[in-house]
Image: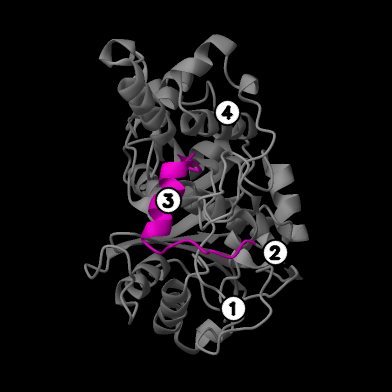
């Protein structure tokens, strides 16, 4: 097994469109949730979302390219371009040893809907020739691969809300086992459109609370559903010796990865959180991490079932150590970025470790008695962080966990 480290990071998020802005938002407890402005919500029960603001696709695309790409791909390429520049990876890896593992939960859904409406209105002859290559879920990865001539393994992952955590984990394994020397890994999502919001509302996943300040309150007794978010997060994973040889800045080392399924229900987590606990245990095995100095970025969706089950999972996996760990849900600020959430939260772990600062769970005012761990309410807290975990739990029972540690000397 070869060691794998993170040498580059990029993000497009509801609280910032680059790493510096994102960290400022996390550390200051900035709320990225607000009224939906993309469409008229008059007939909708759900009024709020965590939208990306002020994203300029022309920083990453020619104007002529925009009509050929869905917004989720634009977000993904933006995050990947940032990560490439941060890592300075270009030109240091043979093309066939450079890969891309960037997935999406729902892909180009806005393109699908726009072209469907055109079909019903104008007929089949008016459908864009770019419909298919814009909507398919693997196109973000393919576009990134073309841009960086990454001819190695390319494997977009689709596991709903666990997508980018699995993408990073599988990329880690590919490098560790020698199939690549570096991989762009993460996820992207752009689904704040009427049909998607209506769909999540109908399956009773979203909060109906119209107040942005209290709509997403993970681990709080008042929670009643998640807030839909969007964006993209991409990291550059690299084989350790390769990174050291070229003098790359190393944010941290991937120490472990867990991947399990509840095999229980299409949307609800297992009530005893057995699968989630096993994913955490798998990630910790051989990692060298203990509860002392451990930061955990929880999935923490602000839904009744998730937060309670996840608390059980931490206790099952860590025992009494669960009460020692510092835990938070950054979704309280970013909303739920769906397939991009795990990537954004992995980056939060690495930044927290680098700055020795635990991001807060903002809005946590009335802790649920069933969620009795240290969930870092309201404000960030300084702490010497020796390692970090990032957990993601997706519809379909998909569970994923990443373990990160420091690289000293």
Mark 3, Cα crowd under 10 Å, few <14 / some 14-19 / many 20+, is some
Mark 3 = which residue?
198
Q: CA distance from mark 1 to mark 4?
A: 37 Å
Q: Position of residue 303 (x, y in %)?
A: 48, 70
Question: Measuring 46% from the left and 51% from the top, which residue is drawn there?
Answer: 338
At x 54% / y 9%, what residue is drawn?
A: 64
Q: In terms of secondary structure, where does tag 2 sit?
A: helix
Label 2, label 1: how many angstroms apart (C-alpha)? 13 Å
291 or 128: nearer the viewer: 128
Q: Which residue is mark 1?
A: 220
Using the numbered discs, state the Cα–Cα distance from disc 3 to disc 2 in whole angstroms: 22 Å
- Residue at 45% x, 80% y: name it: 308
> Which comes sooner in the sequence, label 4 or label 2?
4
Q: Is residue 31 left or right of residue 174?
A: right
* Vertical order, 80 against 185 (above or below): above
Highlighted magenta segment, given as a residue range: 188-210
- Which percent across, then down, holds residue 45? 51, 58
Residue denoted by label 2: 213
Q: Secondary structure at mark 4?
A: helix
- Residue 126 is drawn in which quadrant? top left
Residue 266 location, quadrant: bottom left
Callout 3: helix, strand or loop? helix
Direction from residue 376 to residue 96 in the image, left or right = left
Q: Nearer the viewer, residue 186 or 396?
A: 396
- Left of 211 or right of it: where is 223? left
- Which residue appears at 54% of the width and 58% of the height? 227
Q: Nearer the viewer, mark 1 or mark 4?
A: 1
x, y percentage for residue 271? 33, 80
Query: Which mark sits nearer the N-terminus, 1 or 3?
Result: 3
- The residue at which mark 4 appears reads as 81
Q: What's the CA distance linking mark 4 and mark 3?
A: 32 Å
């Amino acid at each position: 097994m070869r060691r794998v480290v993170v040498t580059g990071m990029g993000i497009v998020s509801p609280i910032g469109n680059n790493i510096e802005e994102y960290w400022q938002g996390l550390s200051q407890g900035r709320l990225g949730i607000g009224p939906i402005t993309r469409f008229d919500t008059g007939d909708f029960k759900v009024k709020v979302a965590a939208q990306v603001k002020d994203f300029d696709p022309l920083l990453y695309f020619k104007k002529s390219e925009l009509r050929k790409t869905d917004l989720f791909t634009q977000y993904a390429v933006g995050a990947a371009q940032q990560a490439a520049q941060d890592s300075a990876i270009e030109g240091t890896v043979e093309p066939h040893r450079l890969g891309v593992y960037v997935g999406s939960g729902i892909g180009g859904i806005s393109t699908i809907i726009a072209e469907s409406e055109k079909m019903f209105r104008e007929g089949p002859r008016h459908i864009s020739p770019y419909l298919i290559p814009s909507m398919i879920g693997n196109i973000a990865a393919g576009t990134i691969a073309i841009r960086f001539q990454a001819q190695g393994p390319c494997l977009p992952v689709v596991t709903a809300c666990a997508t980018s955590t699995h993408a990073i984990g599988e990329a880690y394994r590919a490098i560790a086992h020698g199939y690549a020397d570096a991989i762009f890994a993460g996820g992207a999502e752009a689904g704040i459109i009427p049909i998607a919001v209506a769909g999540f509302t109908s399956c009773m996943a979203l909060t109906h609370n119209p107040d942005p300040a209290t709509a997403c309150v993970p681990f709080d007794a008042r929670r009643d559903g998640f807030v839909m978010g969007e964006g993209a997060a991409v990291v550059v994973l690299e084989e350790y010796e390769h990174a050291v040889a070229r003098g790359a800045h190393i944010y941290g080392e991937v120490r472990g990865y867990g991947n399990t399924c509840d095999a229980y229900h299409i949307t609800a987590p297992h009530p005893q959180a057995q699968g989630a606990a096993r994913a955490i245990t798998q990630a910790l095995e051989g990692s060298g991490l203990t509860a002392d100095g451990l930061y955990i970025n929880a999935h923490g969706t602000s839904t009744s079932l998730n937060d309670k089950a996840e608390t059980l999972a931490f206790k099952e996996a860590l025992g009494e150590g669960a009460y020692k760990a510092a835990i938070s849900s950054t979704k309280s600020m970013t909303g739920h970025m769906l397939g991009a959430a795990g990537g954004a939260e992995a980056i939060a772990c690495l930044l927290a470790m680098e700055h020795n600062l635990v991001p807060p769970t903002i809005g946590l005012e009335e802790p649920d008695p069933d969620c009795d761990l240290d969930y870092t309410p309201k404000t960030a807290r300084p702490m010497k962080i020796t390692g970090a975990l990032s957990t993601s739990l997706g519809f379909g029972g998909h569970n994923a966990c990443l373990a990160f540690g420091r690289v000293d000397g």
